Image (cartoon, rainbow, N blue to C red):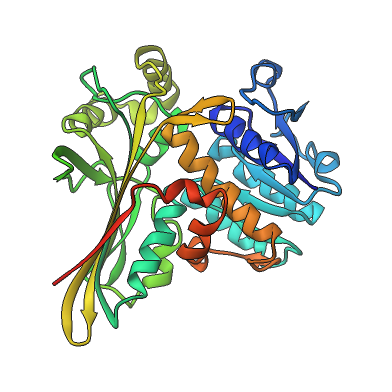
Amino acid sequence: MKQIVVVGAGKIGSTIADMLAESGDYQVTVVDRSQAALDSLETGNAVETLKVEIAEAGALDAVLAGKFAVLSAAPFHLTTRIAEAAAKAGVHYLDLTEDVASTRIVKELAVTAKSAFIPQCGLAPGFISIVANDLAKRFDSLESVRMRVGALPQYPSNALNYNLTWSTDGVINEYCEPCEAIVEGSLVEVPPLEEREEFSLDGITYEAFNTSGGLGTLCETYKGKVRTLNYRTIRYPGHAAIMKALLNDLGLRHRREVLKDILENSLPATMQDVVVIFVTVSGRKGGRLLQESYANKIYSRQMGKMVRSAIQITTASGICAVLDMLANGALPQQGFIRQEDIALDAFLANRFGHNYAQAATSHLAA
């Protein structure tokens, strides 16, 4: 039984800990700075808890000693602190961050690390990169890779058409930071909340717009190999306009704590959500211009003794599957590992990755 440390006792951390403990193959310790969060940990299985001030230098050293891996489900601003502790302890490191700057530091740490460093193991970045890379490999040459992901309420009932389903800090960060993209073959930065588009899936209309971090390392991987590569977050129509007013016109991008307080006290959380995944790749194969798409919707459901939201299921399944593959020797045991280094078939065949396999469709068309 491998010993795992999960940093962060929130909704996602709770789900990760529960899924790993339920498997019977992992002994899990959940670490958080808040005793209240640890006391209210939502798990149906027995896990250990430990209060630690994660931001303090050296705070995690004793906790990580002798462990197999540490999984970060903490706010993005703690990512580098946890990664540094993992490198020092020589344990495997996995995280869920969408923060581009943090991932660059993780990559630097991986150069001299004695263990595997695998950032961005969630939904987007994460699974979306695995899917996009799998589709892209089917073409002789590439024209475009377009990735769209959204975690949405099934029953929107406010002007934002949105409920809080995961980290408020993470949502604000991806709405504010520059977004990587490949445009006309060149790696560029594009502004968040811009380049809005609309599309329909299963008769429902959505909007999508630029947000930061969803591409993971794909821009670097496909630079010089594709004309267009971008990532956009999916919302119901009307959301982007209101967020732009709040962030730009009212200047709340410079007062993120104020915006966080407003959102958390105005928008209720919901367990009745749906994760929408839509990836489209076009390119040439056998001399013909072809397009292939992957579309999937995942809903909240009962898992073990707990009801889990769709974003909890998808995010936790992503990092648990990658950890499981690492533990089984299916991934390199040292250095930096990109999401696109992970084979989609192997991921979906994994007991945790199988949570993504439901209702998936893939179509090849001229």
Vertical relation: 127 (above or below) 157: below
Q: Position of residue 84 (x, y in %)?
A: 71, 50
Q: Is residue 109 visible?
A: no
Q: How many marks?
A: 0
Q: Position of residue 187 (x, y in %)?
A: 33, 66
| Quarter of image, res 176 | top left
Vertical relation: 186 (above or below) 350: below
Q: The C terminus is located in which quarter? A: bottom left
Residue for point 62% across, 42% down: 72
| Quarter of image, res 134 | bottom left
Residue for point 59% across, 38% down: 73
> Image check: 40 left or right of 204?
right
Q: Position of residue 148 (x, y in %)?
A: 29, 50
Vertical relation: 132 (above or below) 36: below
> Image check: 327 left or right of 340?
right
Q: Position of residue 359 (x, y in %)?
A: 34, 48
> Most extreme residue toward the bottom, as rendered?
287
